[in-house]
Amino acid sequence: MVKKSSMAAAAEELGPAPGIQAAIAAASCCAKRGTRHTSGPGNPLNALPLGKLGALPISARGRAGLTYLKASQWRVGAGLGGAPGEVTGRQPPIAWGGGALRATGQLARSSEWRLVRSSDRWDNSEAAVRLSEGAGLRGAMIRRVLPHGLGRGLLTRRPGTRRGGFSLDWDGKVSEIKKKIKSILPGTPCDVLPDTSHLPPEHSDVVVVGGGVLGLSVAYWLKQLENRRGGMRVLVVERDHTYSQASTGLSVGGICQQFSLPENIQLSLFSASFLRNINEYLAVTNAPPLDLQFNPSGYLLLASEKDAAAMESNVKVQKQEGAKVCLMSPDQLRNKFPWINTEGVALASYGMENEGWFDPWCLLHGLRQKLMSMGVFFCQGEVTRFVTSSQRMMTTDDEMVTLKSIHEVHVKMDHSLEYQPVECAIVINAAGAWSAQIAALAGIGKGPPGTLQGTKLPVEPRKRYVYVWHCPQGPGLETPLVADTSGAYFRREGLGSNYLGGRSPAEEEEPDPANLEVDHDFFQEKVWPHLALRVPAFETLKVQTAWAGYYDYNTFDQNGVVGPHPLVVNMYFATGFSGHGLQQAPGVGRAVAEMILEGSFQTIDLSPFLFNRFYLGEKTQENNIM
Amino acid sequence: MWNGTRGIHRLGGAVVPEGNQKKERKMLQFLNNHFYDVEALRGYLLQREMSKVHLKNRSFTWLEEQHGPYSAGAFFILKQGGAVKFRDKEWIRPDKYGHFSPEFWNFREVPVEAVDASDCEINYEGLDNLLLLKELQSLSLQRCPHVDDWCLSRLYPLADSLQELSLAGCPRVSERGLACLHHLQNLRRLDISDLPAVSNPGLTQILVEEMLPNCQVVGVDWAEGLKLGPEEHEVPVFIPGCPWLKVTAPVTLRQPFPCPSSGLGR
């Protein structure tokens, strides 16, 4: 049986537990690539390489004892441990082995280092026994290391006795050493040296910036579609682990197929089947099955005279793609939903299957749980810098173009100046409403306007309000999510005659997205009149609560941005969905993963959503945005 | 020991595990958390269970082309272990070995009137086959472990003919799925008793009755879940014959007096 040690999950990147000998070596030297950087003056301890095991606590005397070792006796292997597939930099042989903490068996096989060879078979208990015999670690090492010269006899005495006396407080020393050994043993927290468990790993194949539903979906599909288990290390960086401003949690949670673009319809259909089979996709042994609280009540879109023709053609496209949508005349509407006032409605489209609303937190939690079980790293921090390298190349039209590639991401911790540079191969921009800032960090948009270099990512945060009200005489249990001709929408919430809804403001009256404060006058003046007109029962309602959230609004054409950037070759976008990101997240995640792993879209072709369209000026406009 | 795993997968396992089963389950969880092999084995068994259900619910399109939709749909139901009744014919049920009489292959034009799919493992994909029976009048999906809200949203094609529907005991059906039964305007009898996933059975019953005015909704007593009014307090009850006993019991309309287990007349 393969036993999972309690360190197994935590210490994946360290490879086999190095044991004490490597820890000794590691402790005493400054690492070339320390795992901890501060931009302030470091304290000398910070220069020590750190890891889950920490380093052996060596007292000053112990360190002095190690000066007997010759630097050349250490040979650090080129593979510095870690999970397979890790991007390992080649490091020169390090004096004391700064990376020795991660050293593999190559270190142990160095023949000149007899202690190492014998300590191959040391386990911690043996060490503890040796120590408790009073031999002292330092004494044991010196004994074995010094080749000739001093005879063995001299060294079998206790170290203290050599000086002709014995040091006071020997028992205290022993208990201190015992405590330190215990703190290295697996399972106990090592509080001798500073803890770095909050920092992301030093290397990661893919860094996903943004831990919302889109980022997690991309990470999920990357792990799901990789060729070998554990073949790719994925790190998800999320700035706010409470998700207080993230669009996912604040969303109304609707899913519908009533779009005008075939790609959007296909994405939505796939997402519906993903949600339907969520317990097969996101199954984690021993975890209870997920309950998405899905309401399959459908969407009802109402169209006035001037929009009726567009709606008819949209419905035709939707039916072609396989969505179950039907058109209804005002009479049929009144028959089916007697609480509707059909004044001004020329046509309505009603989604019968795979449409409704669900709980986005459940999806987020399910994805997180599954990702943790698949071995994805999570880090709470903010991306502050990309370190890129550029290359000038000639296009086929004999034009010089500078291609950039990001090779390091600096992740800064909360409320501190501490940051961790993460070496990476691919960066995914799934930062939602703040994607433009991340893109700007990579240099996207820095150039003369009108050129490809100067094309910024046109995604900005737009604030939207959602109001919850109570209306005891309101529409019954069968109410779909109704979207009025004016853009106001509402749906039922629960069994208790509560409804929630809102409306997208017009361009001129866009609220300031600096904060998430709710404007209640907006409901009074802009939302309620339309609702009361459409549903007469809503003339008497009482607003219970309200909240605001951000749309990652694509100012260009209100559709998502998916795929790589033409100039920053290893940044992939999965953002800008302007209010329908949640319902398309599973499909988009799979598309981005296919793009990364296979080089092109395999299942759903999202080429109309590539970044190039911003430069070429080709809009893929979506007409049915709420 | 592996019965424990099956019980874990099935949401239909609303039965509280008895002592032994609980111990086994705890042991299994402990092993799962500490050994990769056990985790992998459990994952494999789970996948196998799921693929068995998928296999049972595959589409019989070829049969539909050969013998017509009614026979294909009937075959699907009979294979699952349910019973079918063709118009003017008797009920066809599989026996305890799963065998059924092949006479229905000749009923090409005879529509199926009633289907009893109780305890069958029909899921969303399997409904493809069930929806072939366009003139179905009575459908019973009692205690089906994989019928959930998504499946209920697929029943609207049967709206013209369906008059009787029973969902009693389905562990995954909640009030959200019941909301999409409003398409079935010809429904005359709906049974929604014993649905563990419905959060408020009494209120749900009222709302469903409002939604389907011509339908008789059966199963949930609307008084269930109502709290005691202020005049109905807990009253100390004295059992005649044992003055040393004092049992307090809430006085409700339906519950009988709880019998004290004092050996008196029990």
Image (tube, grey):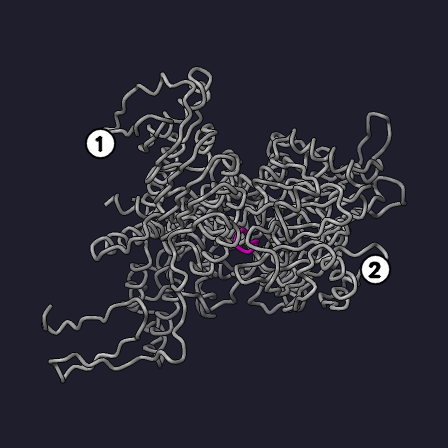
Q: Which residue is mark 2?
A: A509
Q: Chain of mark 1?
A: B
Q: Which residues are magenta?
A: A359-363
- Residue placed at 57% from the left, 42% from the top? A87
Where is residue A555? Give x, y as percent: 80, 48
* Marks 1 and 2, how far apart at CA: 70 Å
Q: Which residue is mark 1?
A: B96
Where is residue B254? Give x, y as percent: 30, 66
Q: Count up the numbered dots.
A: 2
**What secondary structure is marked by label 1?**
loop
**What secondary structure is marked by label 2?**
helix
A459 horizontally vs A227: left or right: right
Q: Specify the quadrant of the image occupied by residue B84.
A: top left
Where is residue A203? Give x, y as percent: 58, 48
Where is residue B33? Give x, y as percent: 35, 52
Asked whether residue A204 appears in the rendered view, the answer is no
A357 horizontally vs B208: left or right: right
Marks 1 and 2 on same chain: no
Looking at the magenta stretch, what is its main secondary structure? helix
